[in-house]
Image: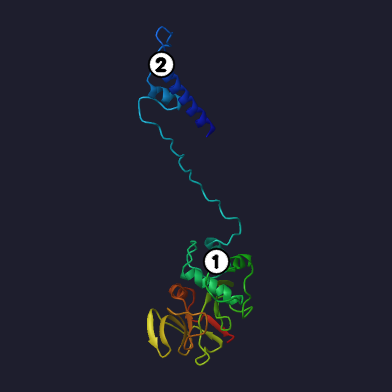
Amino acid sequence: MKSKTVRFVAVLAAVATSVSLAGTPAGAQTPPAPARGLGALLGSLLGQPTGGPPVIPQPAPAVATTPAPPPPGAATPLAVEQHLAGLRYFVGAVDGVVDNDTASGIMAFQKVHGLPRTGELSGDIGPRIMAESGLPAPLVPNSDANKVEVDLTRQVLFLYENGGLSQIIPVSSGTAQTPTPTGSYRVIRRAKGWETSDLGRLYNSQYFVGGYAIHGSPSVPNYPASHGCIRLPMSVAEWFPDHVSLGTPVYVLGG
């Protein structure tokens, strides 16, 4: 602001000098006329080029910045999915997208650890997941290398393959009025696709006793809601039959 004020005073002085020269008496020595007009003089005093419109200063272009990466161990959606998958919870594609499969993994984690069953990546559940490092103990230790364990109390299914825990999946079993039978069983029959039974609509059913099966369903709430079967999320039911076979042991406990 100070430099502009100085320039403006200089302009006024130049104009005043020009007016004073116009009234110089005859015979007095007159300074040589400037080679340029008053507009040029004003332009030079104001720091603008002559012979064209005034130059208006333009703001500097915005500089794009790259966001800083999250700190190690941050509970980002991708990090949570990766960690859940490492803990054997089913999350579907590990892509950082919190979809229904991610919600299933979060739900199973909450069930296993006795947390509120929201299935949502909100509150402190992300840091809680990232802080976990151990795997759940088997319900039936020192048993078959390939097996299915169902915990009716926590409403989760544990799939074991080649002697190790492979996947932890949220399920919905029978209600108090239509309970799921408990005990030690084996897969006795398998069905592909949709079918209708006395217990409802079943998808890719793996029967383990009578008409009771582990099967896919569009409705897998966070509480017991079936007619006695063990419901799986539909995305799980697509691949689950490829990981069991006739004779695979099925242990159903709790309730």
Q: Nearer the viewer, residue 64 or 206?
A: 64
**Residue 234 x/y as whole percent:** 43, 75
Answer above or below: position of 224 versus 169: below
Answer above or below: position of 63 versus 22: below
SS state under label 2: loop
Left or right: 22, with 10 as reference point: left
Q: Residue furthest top?
A: 27
Q: Residue furthest bottom?
A: 177
Which one is closest to the eye, mark 1 or mark 2? 2
Q: Residues within 10 Å of mark 1 (few under 14, many from 20)?
A: many
Sooner in the amino-acid sequence: mark 1 or mark 2: 2
Q: Nearer the viewer, residue 43 or 26?
A: 26
Q: CA distance from mark 1 to mark 2?
A: 94 Å
Answer above or below: position of 219 versus 183: above
**Residue 130 x/y as whole percent:** 61, 65
Residue on which disc 2 sits: 23
Q: Could you tell me how many numbered marks the image carries?
A: 2
Q: Quadrant of residue 159 in the image? A: bottom right
Residue on which disc 1 sits: 85
